[in-house]
Every structure is written in structure tokens, then in C-alpha cells.
Amino acid sequence: MGDGVRCMWMRGGTSKGGYFLADDLPQDAEARDAFLLRAMGSPDPLTSKVAVVRRSAREGVDVDYLFLQVFVDQAIVTDAQNCGNILAGVAPFAIERGLVEAGERQTSVVIYMENTGQIAVAHVDTPAGVVSYEGSASPVPITFNETAGSSCGELLPTGHEVDVIDGVDVTCIDNGMPVVVMRASDLGIAGDESREALDADGALKTKLESIRLQAGPRMNLGDVAEKSVPKMTLVSAPQAGGAINTRTFIPHRCHASIGVLGAVSVATACLLPDSSAAGLAEIPGGSLKELRIEHPSGTTTTLLEVDEAGGVESAAILRTARKLFDGTIFAHANHWGETSAMDTDYLPFHPNPSQPEFVPPAGAVDAHCHVFGPAAQFPYAPERKYTPCDAPKEKLFELRDYLGFERNVIVQASCHGRDNSALLNALRSAGERARGVAVVDPNIGSDELREMDEAGVRAVRFNFVKRLVDAIPQETLLEIAEKIAGLGWHIVVYFEASDLHELLPFLQQLPTVVVVDHMGRPDVSKGIDHPDFQRLVGLLAENENFWTKVSCPERLSSSIPDYEDVIPYASYLVERFPQRVLWGTDWPHPNMKSHMPDDGRLVDLIPRIAAASEQQQSLLVDSPGRLYWP
């Protein structure tokens, strides 16, 4: 890599990134990522997106495209997501690098997206066999193959352009995304209301959900009560020169815009003569129709090609691409040094969690989360059993706000040992919006404890998981318990379910409230009647000072990503001990090996384990408030 690597810098859609040939980069993924970190200068918010492109060996495919996200604040490269914006530059790049031969007027490039396993076809203007970037950018229509009926089996799964559900005309359509299209006026609204106004309209949302639940089986989606499809789109006449104006619920909250494939489905509905959208849409002439779908944040442009009878033959999204520079990039020798040496099998936290549909009540607390590093400022403990990726306070607070929570309880993790510097720094930055759980030395003095208390620490953690920490004599832990009891702190304990029987006599000696992490880590394949889990239930039933957290389904479940097998355990505890149960994300999910959970989906499990609003209020607000903000 010392001689430099060819790199083209392009704007694809609204993003900018570096485009590389796969053959020009190290073939080993770890070495490739290390080079990209040095080449991109991470952390740097201006250099965070990379496209790696190769000639495809797949039949009927021109190139394979891998999108890599280079974190802007940590030494991490991840392929956990796709990027539709950067996709727009792949075809021009492939043509310029000679992977695809250019046509005389326009060149179509079939792209396999390695992140998702999908196929897209991008069309690039190539007058005289050269990619054209005339004007501000080159238009790049992108067609996603085989979208009609992709989830429902048919473009119109009910067999009709319009059905009537609850007295409302609806068009049930699937051209890449199952959508129920309705006229806003039929629901008693204008269709240009703000997201906030629509989200506050309980009667509207109740009616939409009734229609959605009935539409699901008709669209071959089965029972959709626990599904995010079909999307519900209310349409009205265009307001800003587009084809149609929309407000989309996904399915229970009004979306800030509209999904790419949801826009394709709505645009397709506009061309059906009897659909709910047809009488409102402004449709241009010609066989290739550009329809701009208006939404609360702007517009999304779709391109529909129709046959002589007016039927939709293909649908695409219009993006643009522009070459900014082409040359050679030279990576410096070693930017990160020791701070990037996370374990090779360590999974970084999810870079782009989904927006949860469940809205937590006001004052909601994420009662179990962590901060790691940054290692350059807060080094990891020499005796640690694992080395994580940095997960700084800024990322945690950003996630808190994104998920709809107001406060955090930050728990000291074993990778920092008994050095609580990162924890205390985060608590002081958060003020009254965070409390902490520390890990302390048995020789800690009263002055240091008071300093921690002033920063927001309200508990200490005893970790009995042998793969994470070395054993500490129980007599030593009892000494710590006596020291912190006078401050009104409590104790958080972490153990495996199989070890609870041995730990019971010790735990019952503790002089404070005791909170059991992660439901005592039961083996959920054994059922809630198994003695290991019932031993925890008995401990809670017989001791009013014992609490637990219904957290970490991703660690316990073999049913990924829905975690169905954990729901009965969590809901049982919430029902049985409603005043002594907490909930937390466990972000950034240290030591996960099977997968990295989507924090938005974890939030959406809450109404499944605490169905009643009173239970949700107790779980997320009242119970953590009593314990950490009395």
C-alpha cells in the first residue's frame, strides 16, 4: 500500500464518498479496513463512505458493489448497511474504470449489492461512449429488479385497483413495498398537516390501524399486528409542483419522508386509473414518466416506464452522480496505533438503528447502557477480558434522543475495570439526565465515594460472570456493600442462571436494594417453569429488596431478530413484579458474537412485554425514578 491506491471521489445522490476497485485494496478484510481507516483519516465527518466495486462473476450481473461505512468518531469500518446514495455513483465509476463497456448514448449497468443481496440496474448517459457529467451532475435512474409483488406475490394482491375497508376506498399495492393508499380527505384530513399534528391525532391513528389489520390478510401478509407492513399512505393533490402529496405511517407513526420503495409503490398507484390516488395525481405525458412524490421533508423522484396500454413495465428512483476528482490516495503509516486494537471478533454497535414505532412515555429511562473510552482518553483496563470498540458518551446521548428517551443509567463495564473515569465524565456531561453504576475497589475511601455520589453514581456492580472477571472473595464484596449502604446506594449483580443457587446465601446478606441484571440470564429454551428461572422468581417473591431488569433479549434468544422466545420471560416478570422491574438497551452490546441488535427494534419490544400503558409507565419512568432519582 506504500505506493498509493487509485481512488475516485464522487457525489452520489446527497452523499460523497471514495470509490475503489476491489482488486486495488488488500484482499483480507481486516487489512482492507485498516488501510481505509488510515486513508480516510477517520475520525473525520467528511470522509465516512466507501464503495468497493469489482467485476461480477454472477450470471447477468455486471459488477458487485460493497458499501463500507467508516465511522466518523471511531476506528471502525462496517458493512452492516447499504447506501442508496453512494449506489448512484457505482455505474459511472464502473464505466470509467473499464469494468463495463460504455454504449454510444446510454449504458445500463446491472449491480449486485453485496450488503443486501439485491439487484439494481443503473442507467448512465454516455454520449459518444463517455460518461457525461454536464451541468451539476449526471442523472442516474436506478431500477430495482423484480419489485412487483416482492412481498405480497402480486402487484395488486387483492386483485382489485380499489377495495373498501371500513367505508374507505383503499388501493392495496406492492411494487417493492406493501402500501395501502388512501385519499386523505376520506379520513377527514387535508393531507398537508404536519407530522406532529398527525401523530397527535389518536382517532385517525385508530382508524388507520383498523384498516391496516384488515388489509394485511387481503394482501397475503397474514396477521400484521406485530409487523411493520403494510405502510399506510394518505394522498392529496400536490402542493409543490410534484405528482402527488403524501403522509405515510410506518405503520403507527408519521414518517418524515417516504421510503424509496414505498415511493415506487405510491407512484405506481398514481398510474392505475381506478386507484385511490389516480384522481388526485398530476401525471406527465410520454412513456417514461417522472413522478415527484411530495412528503413532509421534500420530494422523492420516481421514474415509471409504461406500455401502450398504460401499464407499468418498470419503476425506478432518480438519483444523480458527479465525479469530483480521480487520482491516487496515500495512506499514512499508522494513524491509530494502540487505540484501534479492538478484538478481531468484536462486533461494533449498530451504525444506523431504525426509528422505533413505539413512543416511550415522557421521562422514560434507558436503565442499562455503557460508555467505552474513547481509549485515547480513557484507556481500557490491563486486566480486561476483551477489548471493545470505542463507544463514547456523545454516541450514547445521540442514541438516547433518537430512541425517544430522556434519561440514562450508565453501568460501568468490565473492560474499564475499577477505573470509573469514563463513567464519571459521562455523568458530569449529562447532569440530571444520567445516573451511574460504578465498580469500586474495596479500599475506596469516603471522600472518593462522596465525589462519585455528587457526579451521579447511585449503585455499585458485582459481576460474577467468570468469563468476564476474576473472582473476588465474598467477604470483600460485603465490605463494599457496607460502605455504600450509608449513601443510600444499591447493588447491581450480574450472574449466569446456573450460578444463582450457589450465590443465594450471599445475595440475601446484602444490606441494600439488589438489582439482578438481564433477568438472571435464563436459558430460554428451557421454559419459564424451569427451576433456574423459578429460582429467580422465588428470590423476588420472598425478598422485597430485590429487583430485576428485563433487558438483553439479544443475549438470551435463539429467535433472531424478533426474540420471540424471550418475550414470555420478560412479560411474566413485568406482570408479577410491576414495581420492581427496569428496562435497558445494553448499548453498545459488548461481546455479542451472533449478531448486532438494532436498538430501534429493541425499543419496539417494550409494548410486547409491557402491554398496558400503566405497565409501561412503571417500567420506564416510575420504577427507575424511585431508584435513581428519588
Image (tube, grey):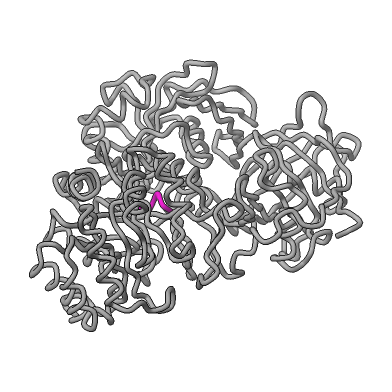
Q: Nearer the viewer, residue 482 or 71?
A: 482
Classify 118 as above or below 521: above
Which of the 4 image quarters holds residue 527? bottom left
Q: Position of residue 455 (x, y in %)?
A: 36, 44
| Residue 556 falls left or right of residue 529 | right
Classify 379 as above or below 533: above
Q: Is residue 613 magenta?
A: no
Classify 284 as above or below 376: above
Q: Nearer the viewer, residue 554 or 195?
A: 554
Q: Position of residue 598 (x, y in %)?
A: 44, 54
Q: Position of residue 526 (x, y in %)?
A: 25, 80
Asked if one can make out residue 394 in the rendered structure from this viewpoint, the answer is yes
Q: Nearer the viewer, residue 590 or 153?
A: 590
Which of the 4 image quarters holds residue 22? bottom right
Classify 353 as above or below 569: above
| Residue 186 falls left or right of residue 194 | left
- Point 26% across, 38% down: residue: 363
Q: Quadrant of the N terminus?
A: bottom right
- Point 86% across, 41% down: residue: 326
Task: Please report the bounds of the magenta region as a residue range.
Answer: 598-603
| Residue 232 falls left or right of residue 148 | left
**Label tally:** 0
Q: Position of residue 413 (x, y in %)?
A: 42, 62
